[in-house]
Amino acid sequence: MRLPDRLPLAHLPTPLQRMDRLSEAWGGPTIWAKRDDLTGFETSGNKIRKLEFHLAAAAAAGADTLVTCGAAQSNHCRATALAAAPLGMAVVALLRTPDGAPPSRSEGNHLLMEMAGADLRYLTPDGYARRDEALEEAAGEVRAGGGTPWVIPEGASDALGMWGYAAAVEELAAQMDGLPPMAALWHAASSGGTTAGMAWAADRLGLDAAVAGCCIGEPAPDVAARIEAIWAEAAEATGEAPPGQMPLLVDDHVGLGYGKATPGELAVQAEATRLTGMLLDPAYTGKALSGLKAEIDAGRYGPGDHVVFWHTGGGFATFQEGFHAG
Ligand SMILES: Cc1ncc(COP(=O)(O)O)c(C=O)c1O
């Protein structure tokens, strides 16, 4: 695959580790963890892979201000704010809160965005529904002030950010060489960029492993529509045809909805931490892993299978009140 220019920001390759104690406890497939929670410390998680492409393009365009958006506890906005700091780029982040006011406590990712010096602005859910306009308005303000903005859409999930996960699948394919075939690359899916990139590369490389997105908030058709849109944009940019088939998208484990976890999900997450030493977050990776356990219990993956759990980060949510189970 020919990829656009990237700025090396992530610590790569991330390890692929066999999680024997977890596999044994759950009595199903051999579970492997692809540790994208280790792409860095401050900038840990999946977003930094996408930002490598966005920040290279921003620098090439002479941008001095990144304008982006996400939830108040967005991993993406936190990674953007901390990645921009050493580059001397300013960050404007439009954050969704229930009432459009700043959160009452500074904790988790939000605290880190503040510490990185990002200009944080808050939107109600209705305002956030029109986030693309709000991003353009904020970019216009930067321009009016003499700056040069670079807009990064939610989750850096567009045809540029997608290459982060296409490259990541190439990285994983080399690590899987000589291992038994993997039945699934199971991961948390939300704004679709991660899944879109994985599935594009899996298709190009003829990978013998199903890309499997566990929807953590939105219904599968909504995530599929996002992936279609990203692929259409990427097809236009490259002149290549997008993959002929959607990856597997499972939305049976959305539970209470985006950012909300049931006591049962938190208990699975806590058990997984005790058995693997990995930190998980209730919004994304904890929910995806408890979704994987439910699929194992239902017989989708059994003994004899090998499954990659792609750990996409989110560990700073552990430092949010009420977001962990003992
Ligand atoms: C920790 C974590 N995992 C997974 C995802 C989902 O990635 P995407 O939005 O590309 O579908 C996100 C995105 O917000 C995330 O923060």
Image: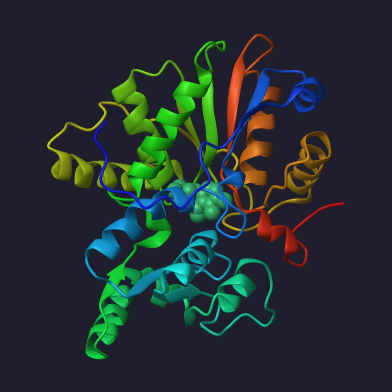
Q: Residue at x 60, y 33 (%)?
A: 15
Give the camera-side residue of 256 and 144.
144
Q: Position of residue 322 (x, y in %)?
A: 78, 63
Residue that extends furthest to the bottom in the rendered view of this protein: 145
Q: Position of residue 9 (x, y in %)?
A: 46, 53
Q: Residue at x 32, y 81 (%)?
A: 138
In the depicted structure, whether residue 147 falls above or below residue 199: below
The type of colouring in the image is rainbow
In the depicted structure, whether residue 7 falls above or below residue 304: below
Q: Is residue 218 visible?
A: no
In the depicted structure, whether residue 218 falls above or below residue 16: below
**The N terminus sits in image quarter:** top left
Q: Position of residue 258 (x, y in %)?
A: 57, 56
Q: Residue at x 62, y 80 (%)?
A: 103
Residue that extends furthest to the right in the rendered view of this protein: 326
Give the camera-side residue of 18 and 198.
18
Give the camera-side residue of 318 and 59.
59
Side of 108 relative to 150 (left or right): right
In the depicted structure, whether residue 306 falls above or below residue 134: above
Exactly how many numbered labels are in the figure? 0
Side of 311 relative to 130 (left or right): right
Side of 26 relative to 195 (left or right): right
The quadrant holding residue 309 is: top right
The quadrant holding residue 265 is: top right
Q: Position of residue 87 (x, y in %)?
A: 42, 68
Q: Is residue 158 visible?
A: yes
Q: Residue at x 64, y 26 (%)?
A: 32
